[in-house]
Amino acid sequence: MLPRLLLLICAPLCEPAGLLLIVSPSHPTEGSPVTLTCKMPSLRSSDAQFQFCFFRDARALGPGWSSSPKLQIANMWKEDSGSYWCEAQTIASKVLRSWRSQINVHRVPVADVSLETQPPGGQVMEGDRLVLICSVAMGTGNITFLWYKGAIGLNLQTKTQRSLTAEYEIPAARENDAEQYYCVAENGYGPRPSGLVSITVRIPVSRPILMLKAPRAQAVVGDVLKLHCEALRGSHPILYWFYHEDVILGSSSAPSGGGASFNISLTAEHSGNYSCEANNGLGAQRSEEVTLNFTVPTGARSNHLTSGVIEGLLGTLGPATVALLFCYGLKRKIGRRSTRDPLRSLPSPVPQEFPYLNSPTPGQLQPTYENVNVVSGHDVYSLVYYNQPEQESAAAETLGTHMEDQVSLDIYSRLRKANITDVDYEEAM
């Protein structure tokens, strides 16, 4: 109020008599300093000391009246544009006033808007702090910054400040914060957008789930077992390791999710506990153990049993038993070959049976001869049936056949050691 009152009082008495206002620079831009100088060319050093005051649009600037003919303004803004003048006076003289000078402060439009992230690179761990920094290379005055998420441009925040940079903070990043972001800056000359920045939220793997898949309800030796391991959460790619009793079976990668699988062909040694491990570089997680018990076929066990029994017999009974077993095996082999020989079982469209029954002697088996067909001329082919005791079971017969095959092989090996040639053996068989 006091400077305004003084201005009104002295206005009629003030005359612009040789007083100049010098503005440096004459065309300031926003944010730059300006120096105002009130100069009296006719003033001599012997003259009395003057008091000076600077005004803008009828308002006194700075400290008011002072002995300094200069006024320093640190930063000029767009709203500082207006009409400026200065006044000077002594105690004994009237007040002198300069001509008015119009000062227009120029605003620099924003340019080169960019968006950066902290941490750098746009990758952040789940739960960590994420900062989006919007910057302009140039621009003056109050700049309005806006942050947007996604292609549809969801506005996240708006800030207005006299600064070339502004920040938007996400205190704890979550999985749904993984998106594209951009910012916009403007200071009255139109909005200027930044480029898109992709944010990736890195998520450690969760504890994986292991599943065992077999071709049947009760797996057996020889089946292909499929091990499938999958972590339901975690950033890709994920590397999976498969274990049997804590021994590594192999590994498989899942570049884009969905888990990974590993196949093995079951043997008797594959019974036990299985597990898997998932790792995406942010920490490994191990699954719970899955126990697999499967059946070993009885045929495999009987093969081992038969082989062991025969080896024991051959090693214990000696050469006499070997000769007897050779004769027995030779007889049964010739019998089986005759039944399998196609020349002795020729088909006939009209079979005819001609039974020849002979009275048996006491204590002997009773053979039955049957004429089964007449092929041509007077050639007659016959089959001979022996009535076997009923107490011989089918299981014993099967085991006997298997033992015969095994005996033949072992006898052949023994004969080779006894210098009996292959030709002699083949002729005998």
Image (cartoon, rainbow, N blue to C red):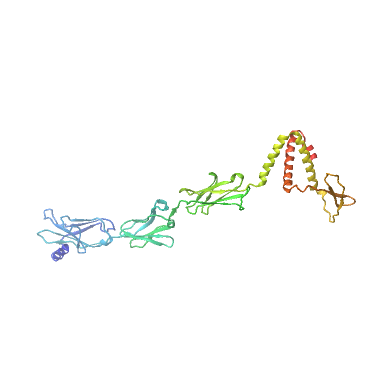
State the residue at coordinates (80%, 43%).
334
Q: Quadrant of residue 11?
A: bottom left
Q: Position of residue 162 (x, y in %)?
A: 30, 58
Residue 363 as seen in the image, left or right of residue 181 = right
Confirm whether residue 15 shows in the render: no
Q: Residue at x 74, y 46 (%)?
A: 397
The answer to whether 60 is drawn above or below residue 282 in the figure is below
Q: Quick check: 115 left or right of 97?
A: right
Q: Residue furthest right?
A: 378
Q: Is residue 56 left or right of residue 330?
A: left
- The percent coordinates of residue 165 (x first, y second) are 34, 55
Tell me where residue 236 appears, x and y as whole percent: 49, 52
**Residue 370 vs residue 7, the one in the foreground:** 370
The one nearer the camera, 265 or 52, is: 265
Depicted 320 relative to depicted 259: above or below: above
Name the quadrant of the N terminus. bottom left
The answer to whether residue 77 of the structure is visible from this angle is yes
Classify residue 75 by image quadrant.
bottom left
Residue projecting furthest to the front: 362
Indicate the position of residue 196 as horizontal and vertical percent values.
42, 57
